[in-house]
Image (tube, rainbow, N blue to C red):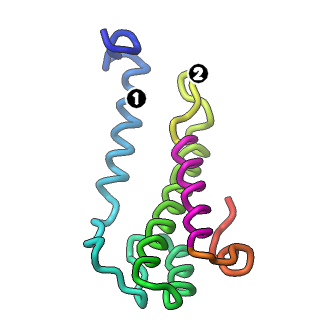
Amino acid sequence: MGLRGPARNPDSRRGRAEARRAQKLQQSISTAAVLPDASVIDANVAPAYLSVAMQDLWRHVASRLRVHELAVLKSACEAYDLAQKARLLIAQEGLVINKRRHPAIDVEARAAEYFARAIGQLHLDVPSECTTFLPRI
């Protein structure tokens, strides 16, 4: 018996649903592009694994940033993309799963918060510089 009670029976309906969600998450992780070496960041070329919106943002602001700020921008773009993926997952599966709030809700909130903080740290004017690149869902 674990901390949250007995382990789920993989043959039960809830166990199969959890196994499908875990498999879907693993597939999305395995199909993602392999991330390049973090020590090499080129201001002229946006990372290929970023969404189109984040690549546009990168091209718009990266040339004005210093090397250490490029790492912050890269993390911010990754956080934004993660928040969007979490939003889509919540939209597909709903806010509640098995009478509990969807775990992607916390992922989306933390990623969106990190994105906002990182953009603030870079002193970018979000309304004028970023909103044209950020699609609304």
Of the two numbered discs 2 and 1 on the same chain, state the one appearing first in sequence.
1
Q: How many marks?
A: 2
Q: Which structural element holds mark 1? A: helix
For the point 41% across and 73% down, the residue is: 71
For the point 39% across and 71% down, the residue is: 49
Q: Judge whether residue 11 is colored magenta.
A: no
Query: Residue 104, percent across and down?
Result: 52, 42
Label 2 Cα neighbours within 10 Å, binned few <14 / some 14-19 / many ≥20? few
Which one is nearer the viewer's eye here, 125 or 82? Answer: 125
Q: Give left or right: position of 4 versus 121.
A: left
Q: Judge whether residue 115 is colored magenta.
A: yes
Q: Which residue is mark 2?
A: 99
Q: Main secondary structure of the magenta part?
A: helix
- Please provide the residue range marked out in magenta: 105-121
Label 1 Cα neighbours within 10 Å, binned few <14 / some 14-19 / many ≥20? some
Of the residues shown, which amino acid type is indicated by label 1? Glu
Question: Image height check: is 131 above or below 110?
Answer: below
Residue 126: quarter of image: bottom right
Query: Residue 137, percent across and down?
Result: 67, 58
Query: Residue 136, percent across and down?
Result: 69, 63
Question: Image height check: is 106 above or below 82?
Answer: above
Q: Are marks 2 and 1 in contact (CB under 8 Å)?
A: no
Question: Image height check: is 5 above or below 24?
Answer: above
Q: Which residue is mark 1?
A: 18
